[in-house]
Structures are given as structure tokens and as C-alpha cells.
């Protein structure tokens, strides 16, 4: 089969790009289409494919200001010529699924989430925006929602990265979705001996408001307990101002440093609601338990009272209580490692390949349909 993969933008290597890497492994001859590409920010395995960009890439400062061009992205997607492809896979979080596949190509959308800034997190983005953005957001979001729902009919089959996202797809698009969790490189992480554990808790991730890193810092300030924070983002400056003497904010760290901190922490603290959440799986692969907000993807990866504990409200008191509950539980690192292994890359490859085979039929049937 000739395969095209449409990915919203290629400006870093986060969870969506890890999925794209796995898709490139499954389909080594696939062509990639995206709005904007920064070759210096993506892996060699992605760069080895033919990558084509939309006209968004030719607009001023597109590599850094691509989100400002969101209103133009529907038009850009619809100008992509997908003639001659048998299978089209859209990787959706920003606009990607709105392409126009040509018959009889099968269009499968792997959805990390319907666009958060126009759906489930619209009000959070609106409240945190400046005056001009708030004036523009209501009509723009209305237009994008209408287009987003309409283009869901261009998808033959949806795959969601979690049951949480499958529920959103059902709510917004009225479509069912197969749940296939994204790949995690669990084999890159290793537990250490108990004697090597250190006296700190760990928070890892992008430091943005919806992930609620401020709650974790306030909780550990109150407990006067050590917390190490790894990551960067728009809240970095504010968090450094509120961090007490027991909180260390390291900013961005190398992968080797990240693995070191994962393996030696008392537990990972995960205060936000994520679509899936790779970070808790990486912590479990390192043999460490997770203290997580009991909503979203973490509820599908962390096993309560076996590989972690949950708190039910996003608040300082709830985090403090969860830390105290975790201290009373005797966790077995091997349970965490075994749980994490269920999300390894090979599992994703097998499940996604099997789903595509069922969705498309054999490649021979597709080629005959095209010829006939």
C-alpha cells in the first residue's frame, strides 16, 4: 500500500511525535505531510521519510508562531493532494484529520485528543489569554468547531490514545473509537537497588497551567518535603518564585539525568489531567510509584494501591493526603515495571497493525479496487 501520514506540526519530540515514530516504523515507505517542520527538532527516524509542508510553513516566523496561523490550517489541509494513496493516517491533536482523501483510500485518524483549545479546555485557554485573544477566540472557536465536526465525517475509523479521548470523540463527533494506547519506550528505564533510593519526590513535564504544577509545589512547601521539578514552560518563572526551600526546580534536563531522577525518587507526583500521560508510565518503568490526580489517562495506566495512589480533587490538601497514604503502602517495584511493560512500543505496533489490517482488508483487495 502507498501510505500517507498527516501530522499537525513537527517542532519537537513529545508524545505525538513518539507515536509518529512508531507509525514510521510500521510503514517505512510512508510520506509525511505537516503544516510546519523544524528538522533540528525531530528524530532521524522521522527525517528519513519524505516530509511535505503546507503553505503555513512559508508564512513569517511559522516555526515559532505556527499556532497563530490556526485559522488558516483548515484551508491548508484541504489543499494537500492525496491522490494515489491507499491508506491515509492522520495524527490528530492540532488540525490534521481535515484532509480530503481520494476514493478508495481508507482514512484512519489516530486521535491524541480533539483540539483542546476549542473543546474541553476552551475556557482555561480563554481565561489565561490576553485581551485581543479573548476578543478573537469566540468567533474563531465557533468556526473551528463547526469545521472540526464536519471533517470527522472524512474519517473512516477513529483510534483514540485512551478511553478518556474515546469519550471525547463520542461526545464531540458522535463517533466510536478503538482505544490503542500510545507507545512508551519502557526499556529505556531501569529500577535501582533500594539502597540507591533518595529522599525526594519528583514532578516531570511541561510547566503549563492545566498540568497544575503549582499545586504540587504548594503542597510540598506545606509539608516541608523535598520535591524535584524537571521541565520548562510558561509557568517556570512563577513557579521559581513560589518554590520553598525544599523544592528544587531544575528546568529542562538531559534524558540520562531524567532517568537518574526517575529511578531514585520516592514517587512521581502527577497533578494534572492528561489525555494519556507518558510520564507515569516512564516512572513505573523505573520501578517507582505514582501519586496522580484520579482523572484522565493516569487512571488507565496506574493501578490504585499497587503501582500508585490517586487523589480525587485538584487541591493542596488532596495531594498532601495522597502523599501520606502512599507512605503507608509497601510497593513492589517489580509490579510497577510489569505494569509499564504493557504499554511498550511493541504492543502499540502489534495492535495498530492489526487494526489497520481489519479496517482496510488486504492490500491486494485495495489495489484491485483502485484498478477496477
Image (cartoon, helix red, strand yellow):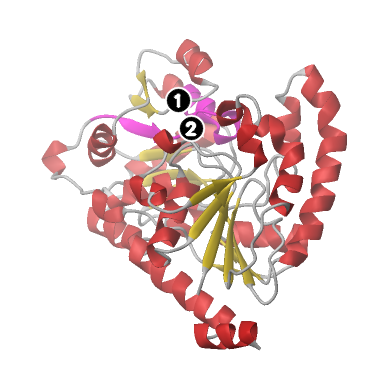
- Residue 352 within the segment the image draws in magenta: no
Q: Which mark is residue 206?
A: 2
Q: Is residue 192 above or below residue 231?
A: below
- Residue range in magenta is 199-219
Residue 122 lies left or right of residue 223; in this view the side is right
Residue labelled with disc 1: 232
Q: Determine whether the residue tagged by mark 1 lies in a helix, strand or loop.
A: loop
Quarter-of-image position of residue 29: bottom left
Residue 134 lies left or right of residue 274; in this view the side is right
Residue at (49% x, 19% y) in the render: 236
The location of residue 31, given as percent across then percent down, is 50, 58
Residue 143 lies left or right of residue 329; in this view the side is right
Residue at (42% x, 51% y) in the render: 18
Q: Is residue 359 above or below residue 344?
A: below
Q: Quadrant location of the C terminus?
A: bottom right
Q: CA distance from mark 1 to mark 2?
A: 6 Å
Q: Nearer the viewer, residue 205 or 330?
A: 205
The location of residue 310, given as percent across then percent down, is 48, 48
Count of numbered circles on the image: 2
Q: Determine whether the residue tagged by mark 2 lies in a helix, strand or loop.
A: loop
The location of residue 93, given as percent across then percent down, is 61, 48
Quick check: can you spot residue 110? Answer: yes
Quick check: can you spot residue 296? Answer: no
Residue at (41% x, 50% y) in the render: 46
CB contact under 8 Å: marks 1 and 2: yes
Amino acid at each position: 500500500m502507498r501510505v500517507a501520514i498527516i501530522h499537525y506540526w513537527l517542532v519537537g519530540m513529545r508524545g505525538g511525535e513518539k507515536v509518529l515514530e512508531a507509525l514510521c516504523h510500521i510503514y517505512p515507505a510512508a510520506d509525511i505531510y505537516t503544516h510546519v517542520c523544524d528538522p533540528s527538532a525531530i528524530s532521524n527516524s522521522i527525517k528519513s521519510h519524505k516530509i511535505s509542508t503546507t503553505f503555513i510553513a512559508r508564512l513569517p516566523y511559522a516555526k515559532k508562531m505556527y499556532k497563530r496561523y490556526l485559522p488558516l490550517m483548515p484551508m491548508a489541509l484541504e489543499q494537500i493532494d492525496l491522490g494515489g494513496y491507499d491508506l491515509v493516517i492522520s495524527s490528530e491533536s492540532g488540525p490534521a484529520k481535515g484532509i480530503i482523501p481520494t476514493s478508495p483510500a481508507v482514512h484512519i485518524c489516530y486521535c491524541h485528543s480533539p483540539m483542546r483549545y476549542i473543546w474541553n479546555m476552551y475556557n482555561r485557554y480563554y481565561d489565561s489569554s490576553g485581551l485581543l485573544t479573548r476578543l478573537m477566540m469566540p468567533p474563531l472557536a465557533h468556526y473551528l468547531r463547526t469545521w472540526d465536526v464536519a471533517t470527522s465525517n472524512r474519517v473512516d475509523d477513529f483510534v483514540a490514545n485512551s478511553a478518556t479521548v474515546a469519550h471525547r470523540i463520542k461526545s464531540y463527533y458522535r463517533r466510536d473509537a478503538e482505544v490503542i494506547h500510545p507507545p512508551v519506550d519502557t526499556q529505556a528505564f531501569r529500577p535501582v537497588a533500594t539502597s540507591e533510593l533518595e529522599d525526594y519526590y519528583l514532578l516531570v513535564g511541561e510547566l503549563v497551567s492545566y498540568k497544575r504544577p503549582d499545586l504540587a509545589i504548594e503542597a510540598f512547601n506545606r509539608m516541608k518535603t523535598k520535591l524535584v521539578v524537571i521541565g520548562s514552560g510558561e509557568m517556570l518563572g512563577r513557579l521559581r518564585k513560589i518554590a520553598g526551600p525544599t523544592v528544587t526546580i531544575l528546568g529542562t534536563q538531559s534524558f540520562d539525568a531524567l532517568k537518574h531522577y526517575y529511578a531514585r525518587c520516592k514517587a512521581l507526583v502527577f497533578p494534572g489531567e492528561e489525555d494519556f500521560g507518558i510520564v507515569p508510565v516512564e516512572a513505573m518503568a523505573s520501578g517507582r510509584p505514582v501519586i496522580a490526580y484520579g482523572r484522565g489517562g493516569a487512571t488507565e495506566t496506574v493501578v490504585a494501591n499497587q503501582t500508585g495512589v490517586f487523589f480525587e480533587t485538584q487541591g493542596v490538601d488532596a495531594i498532601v493526603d495522597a502523599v501520606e497514604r502512599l507512605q503507608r503502602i509497601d510497593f513492589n517495584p517489580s509490579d510497577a515495571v510489569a505494569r509499564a511493560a504493557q504499554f511498550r512500543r511493541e504492543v502499540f505496533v502489534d495492535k495498530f497493525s492489526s487494526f489497520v489490517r481489519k479496517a482496510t482488508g488486504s492490500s491486494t483487495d485495495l489495489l484491485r479496487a483502485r484498478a477496477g
